[in-house]
Image (cartoon, grey):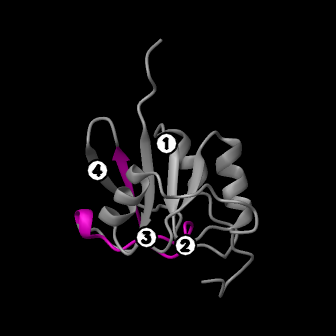
Amino acid sequence: MEKKPMKVIVPLDEQAGQSSKVCGHFGSAPFYAVADMDANTIEIIPNASNHHDHGSCTPAGFFSGLGISVLLCNGIGAGAAAKLQSMGIAVYMAEMAPTLEETLRRFNSGVLKKVTPQQACQGHGCH
């Protein structure tokens, strides 16, 4: 059986390659890094739905077409986390990692934990 490629997505504040700052909240990120962990490639794409009312963003649907298997983030709402998890996308907290490079390093080292409902944001001002 062929192994499914591992693609990881990380919300970003900017397009600065590995030095890009990680956005504090999943749905409000202006950009997302799509890291193919098997091919060792990174593509930074714009968030087509970043101008939204809190709680009404829909980037999760967009990710399903990209073959994403993991989201690494510093903050995410409970609804978005549940939707991603129901789509088979594992959600991990990046423990306030400052850059894309550090986020991916932490993930590869196995220190990040999967998001629980208690860790998800309940509204603005949560972090």
Q: Amino acid at mark 4?
A: Ile
> Considering only order in the chain, which callout, 1 or 2, is on the residue closer to the N terminus?
2
> Considering only order in the chain, which callout, 3 or 4, is on the residue closer to the N terminus?
3
Dot 3, how many residues are within 10 Å of its Cα: few (below 14), some (14-19), or many (20+)? some
Write the start and end of the magenta stretch as one range: 17-36
Residue marked by disc 4? 42
> Considering only order in the chain, which callout, 4 or 2, is on the residue closer to the N terminus?
2
Residue 35 part of the magenta-drawn span: yes
Tell me the residue at 24%/63% (across/down): 17
Give the vertical position of 72 relative to 84 (above or below): below
- Of residues 70 and 79, the one nearer the viewer is 70
Mark carried by residue 68? 1
Q: Amino acid at mark 1?
A: Ile
Dot 2, how many residues are within 10 Å of its Cα: few (below 14), some (14-19), or many (20+)? some
Residue marked by disc 2? 25
Q: Residues under labels 1 and 3: Cα distance?
A: 18 Å
